[in-house]
Amino acid sequence: METTRQQKVSKAILKELSFIFQKETRQFLGNILVTITSARVSPDLSVAKIYLSIFPAKDPDESLQVLNNNKKYFRTILAQSVKNQLRIIPELIFYLDDSAEYAEQIESLLKK
């Protein structure tokens, strides 16, 4: 169960990173759409797990690897935008969110 503080920090990170990804991912991935589906922060607020949906990518794992290789860049920009809200900027770890694919798979199984 997340505390209220964790939820507030998660929402702030989610909001700011969505703006950052909207502007900055084009230089790393080209015309691939990256959507943040959720953000979870550790209890000590030092690590943020960011779940991403990447579309239309031939290999989403490769795109995820590019983003993970440049996570220091995204953390720096995040720090500049939330410096008045957060004292500690959490370390970012990006994960691929496969919930849409999972839901599609379950839906196809139900139709059979």
Image (cartoon, grey):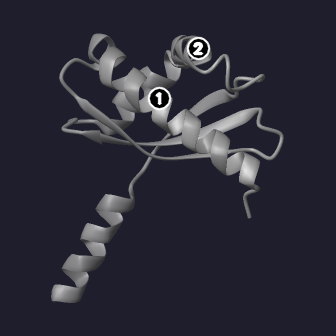
Residue closest to the eye, 49 or 10: 10
Q: Quarter of the image holding residue 79?
A: top right
Left or right position of 111 against 33: left
Q: Quarter of the image holding residue 109?
A: bottom left
> What kind of element bears circle 1?
helix
Cα–Cα gap, marks 2 and 1: 13 Å
- Residue at image mark 1: 17
Please state, as top left, top right, bottom left or bottom right, where the C terminus lies in the image.
bottom left
- Residue at image mark 2: 72
Residue at 22% across / 17% down in the picture? 30
Tally the marks: 2
Please state, as top left, top right, bottom left or bottom right, where the N terminus lies in the image.
bottom right
Residue at 50% across / 15% down in the picture? 70
**Sequence-first tag of 2 and 1:** 1
Instruction: List x then y, in percent, for residue 53.
Output: 35, 44
In this view, the residue farthest toward the right is: 44
The crowd level at tag 1 (other Cα within 10 Å; few <14, some 14-19, many 20+) is: many
Above/below status of 8 relative to 72 = below
Instruction: List x then y, in percent, for residue 74.
Output: 51, 17
Residue closest to the eye, 35 or 97: 35
The crowd level at tag 2 (other Cα within 10 Å; few <14, some 14-19, many 20+) is: few
Amino acid at circle 2:
Lys
Instruction: List x then y, in percent, for residue 19.
Output: 39, 26
